[in-house]
């Protein structure tokens, strides 16, 4: 399988490493808006230009991409890339580290990224374009919406529901049967003991609502 990566930063580096270890995938290049990266290499892969090249590459026969851009509380650009690629009829591939554990009964949407040593347990359900980052745990019967990012070392206990576009910060814990609303941010290290409304930012132990996402997401 031949693929182009969208993004050439740190997140893309990890995905390149995962794809190498998965085997059978050849990354033909990366696209990134940062002109300083053009014609350089990332992990041995050339940065060809920005994502304006994608329609031409699709016309030339490209069929597969990966989203090499993470999110730290604001998934706007990641979602934009996803929609752009899908609008061109391109498939967004899975990138699943061989050291991750995924239950056979888990349901994964398209374009999932699962980093090293992550766990996705029995009958968990993940939407499209979800990131489950290194060492994080998604326990049994959890439901994650589209474009969710579970950051490194975060833990979702059983039957947690996370709405579309939400971010669970590094090292955070969400207790069983809790609902995290759409577009919300759980700050790094927070312990969530009650439901989180849509578009909220919660921090601390126990987690408390800090403000709304539009004002403070990028600070978490």
Image: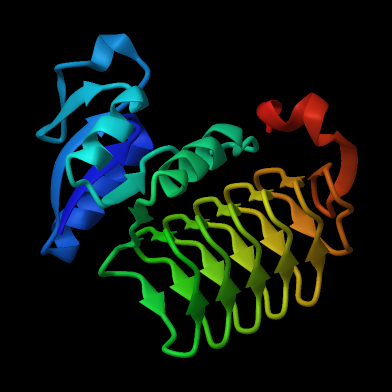
| Quadrant of res 192 | bottom right
Point out the image quarter for the N terminus: bottom left
Q: Is residue 198 something one can see in this rendering?
A: yes
- Whether residue 41 sits left or right of residue 36 in the image: it is left
Give how far across and how far down residue 21 sits, in percent: 16, 60
The residue most toward the top is: 36
Q: Residue at x 58, y 36 (%)?
A: 72
Q: Residue at x 54, y 87 (%)?
A: 122
Q: Residue at x 28, y 40 (%)?
A: 5
- Whether residue 87 sits left or right of residue 195 in the image: it is left
Residue sitting nearer the eye, 98 or 60: 60
| Quadrant of res 44 | top left
Residue sitting nearer the eye, 194 or 143: 143
Q: How is the image coloured?
A: rainbow
| Quadrant of res 67 | top left
Give how far across and how far down residue 190 sits, in percent: 73, 50
Give how far across and how far down residue 113 sits, in percent: 41, 58
């Amino acid at each position: 399988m031949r693929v182009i990566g969208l993004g050439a930063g740190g997140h893309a580096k990890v995905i390149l490493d995962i794809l190498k270890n998965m085997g059978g995938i050849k990354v033909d290049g990366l696209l990134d808006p940062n002109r300083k990266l053009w014609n350089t290499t990332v992990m041995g892969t050339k940065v060809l230009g920005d994502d304006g090249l994608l329609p031409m590459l699709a016309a030339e026969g490209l069929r597969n991409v990966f989203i090499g851009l993470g999110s730290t509380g604001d998934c706007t650009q990641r979602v934009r890339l996803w929609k752009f690629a899908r609008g061109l009829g391109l498939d967004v591939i899975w990138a699943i580290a061989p050291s991750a554990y995924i239950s056979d009964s888990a349901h994964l949407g398209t374009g999932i990224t699962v980093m090293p040593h992550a766990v996705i347990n029995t009958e968990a359900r993940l939407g499209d374009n979800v990131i489950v980052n290194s060492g994080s745990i998604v326990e049994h019967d959890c439901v994650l919406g589209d474009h969710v990012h579970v950051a490194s070392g975060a833990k979702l206990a059983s039957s947690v529901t996370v709405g579309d576009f939400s971010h669970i910060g590094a090292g955070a814990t969400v207790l069983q049967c809790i609902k995290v609303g759409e577009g919300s941010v759980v700050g790094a290290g927070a312990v969530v003991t009650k439901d989180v409304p849509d578009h909220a930012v919660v921090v601390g132990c126990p987690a408390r609502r800090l403000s709304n996402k539009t004002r403070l997401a990028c600070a978490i």
